[in-house]
Amino acid sequence: MKHFKETLYDAVCQEYRVDKLYFESKTEHQHLMIFHNAQLGRVMTLDGVVQTTEADEFIYHEMLAHVPILAHGKVKRVLIIGGGDGGMLREVLKHPIEQVTQVEIDQAVVDMAIEHLPNHSAGAYDDPRLNLVIANGFDFVKNTANSRDSKFDVIISDSTDPIGPGEVLFSEDFYAYAKACLNDNGILVTQNGVPFFQEDEVQNTARRMQPHFKDRRFYCAPIPTYYGGFMTFAWGTDNLNAISVSPETLEKQLEQLNLATRYYNAGIHQAAFALPEYIRSAVARA
Amino acid sequence: MNTIGGHDTRPLRCAPDSTLEAFYRALIAQHGSPLLVFDKAILRQKFRALQSALPGVELYYAVKAHPDQHIIEVINQLGGGFDVASAGEMDLLLEHKVSGRRTIHTHPIKKDQEIRDALRFGATTFVVDNLHELRKLVPYRSRVGVLLRVSFRSSSAKVDLSKKFGCAPNEVFDLVSNAEALGIHIKGLSFHVGSQCLDASKHVEAINECANLIKTINQGASRPLSVLDIGGGFPADYELTGLDIDAFCAPIRSALASLPSDWHIIAEPGRYLIAPAVTSITTVTGLSRRGGYQWYYLDDGVYGSFSGQIFDHAVYPLQIFKTGAPVASIIAGPTCDSIDVIAEDILMPELEIGDLVMGLQMGAYTAATKTRFNSIPDAKLIVVDSREQSAK
């Protein structure tokens, strides 16, 4: 395949030139590729959908990692569901946390990413604070919710699309179990699609999360290769102070950290919760 | 069938051809009998012939006609698209890394899981013919483009595909406005006039009717329809009369020429492309003289490669490498069932055990519908490329 054509939408599609194919695997129902593109660096695709590119992954990973961790302010334990490419882990480990548990369904994804997308994890998989669990993310939160195991301050769901292996991570049961895996002030964030093209997705999540969190909302950022404008991230917590963390507090925290971010900053943190009207009204109609 | 004298009037070629016979015998020596021999060169030639007979029409090979990976590989190399109807067919395409953008999912009736599988594979074009099916697409409405299948019955087609699927032309307007209300975009119409059509008159009628429907809808549509899927129905040459596909398609060409140039015209050929590219090779394994007939028992029959004689109502031309006085004969398959007869009361030169009997035009709906009856092994598909062979 000399060109990759995304298959998300019938009437429009983005096309990438494949400059060098690094990795390709096709199992019975799954087709994964990692290739180089002159404009975007290394690109990973799954089942005809762009998952991540070296050029713009920073926006996505910074916004899912730093927003909840800094809003919470005292994070010690983080849970990442999915995120096999390691980019989320890399960003989370920039914080002085005690432990991060990452639950990935397939060890092969981690191994493949370390080999073919090395800049994503950038050594993060060697960090002693990591507890890597190879398991189904849904089963993991279900079992943890029903156990006496330690809970988490932040849970990040870095999943694939709802059509495909990530389907259960968008179910109401998942949100309920995730909630039960959070400490009192804990925050759940999830990737939630591009509502300009996938309005149903943000509405489904709004409905399914609503019963389980006192504060359920969305924030957003534009990730160029998740074509269609803003991507939304779902936010669920019973910690009503998390949303109103002041710019001064954020600035002070950022000064003590060395996040070296390229998208996230204190201003973006606050601004990201302001939703464009088409997204705000879609959520309101859910 | 009481009088003996050749009621089976299918084409039968009886002539020695030592080169061809030696070639087939060598294949059998290597791979066993029975076989299906797929000649890639013929498929390439038919694909190009149909492309030039229908310029500007995108061709989607109907995978169901013969879901084989070697056949898919050739269509893929030619840049053709694929018409699929199941997850199994999509898995075959995945083997060759065919992009979902080059496929259309054409089964009008689907389970939710089948829709999800198709979307994961990357097929975003779906076909529906009623409101129940439209509703199933609501959760995926931002991603899909829908073709509405309209039914036009063809009296000349051997297999009538409008009996089971397709809405009546007068239902189209309601379905389009229902879809609009559900937030689903109907991007065009499709039809199937039937399989193995004798002429293109029904295609032309359906093209004209669909064009009128689309034009009427587009007068008030916020999202215009722009796709017309003219289905299949392009015939195979079962009579060996030297079918001229260009002449067959001439009326279709002129009907399409009058359509707006910004419409997308697509077709789903299966039989025309693949039927002539596959030859069945069987061996006479038994002889008998019964009820005045010479009986021949072959190692393949209607439960195997000749299953199309039951399911597809096809009658395949036969070829033998013998000449001689015609004898009233019956050619039967290898299973224990008495329905397993390939040719009843056919006049042909006498054969011996070990002689070859070839079935011609046997690429479409043959192996695709074979059964496992009697646990008799399948005919293996052997790939040859006559262009390469003649070049050697």
Image (spheres, rainbow, N blue to C red):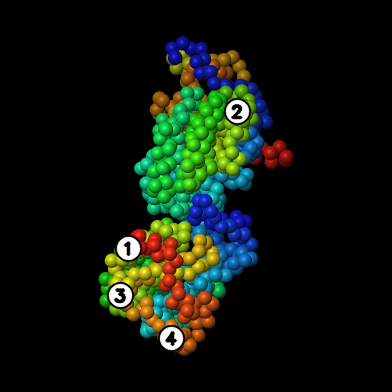
How far, Cα to Cα, is label 3 from label 2? 69 Å
Local SS, label 2:
helix
Answer yes or no: do the residues labelled 3 and 4 have beta carbons within 8 Å? no
In the rendered image, the quadrant that contains the N terminus of chain B is top left
Query: What's the residue type where badge 1 is placed?
Result: Arg
The residue that mark 4 highlights is: A248
Q: Is residue B40 left or right of residue A207?
A: right
Query: What's the residue type where badge 3 is placed?
Result: Asp
The residue that mark 2 highlights is: B251
Q: Nearer the viewer, residue B96 or A240?
A: A240
A193 versus B237 height, above or below: below
Q: Residue furthest right?
A: B391
B214 versus A248 height, above or below: above
Whether labels 3 and 2 share one chain? no
Q: Which mark is residue A208?
A: 1
Q: Residue at x 48, y 26 (%)?
A: B154
Whether labels 1 and 4 share one chain? yes
Q: Nearer the viewer, residue A126 or B208?
A: B208
Q: Residue B56, position in %: x, y?
A: 62, 40
Instruction: Return the disc, 1 or 4, that comes first in the chain's sequence.
Output: 1
The residue that mark 3 highlights is: A238
How far, Cα to Cα, is label 1 from label 4? 34 Å
Query: What's the residue type where badge 4 is placed?
Result: Glu
Mark 2 — on which chain does it sit? B
Q: Residue B142, position in %: x, y?
A: 45, 53
Q: Which mark is residue A68?
A: none
Q: Residue A145, position in %: x, y?
A: 29, 71
Query: Within 10 angstroms of label 2, few (less than 14), some, or many (20 or more) residues?
Result: some
How far, Cα to Cα, is label 2 from label 1? 56 Å
Query: Within 10 angstroms of label 3, few (less than 14), some, or many (20 or more) residues?
Result: some
Whether labels 2 and 1 share one chain? no
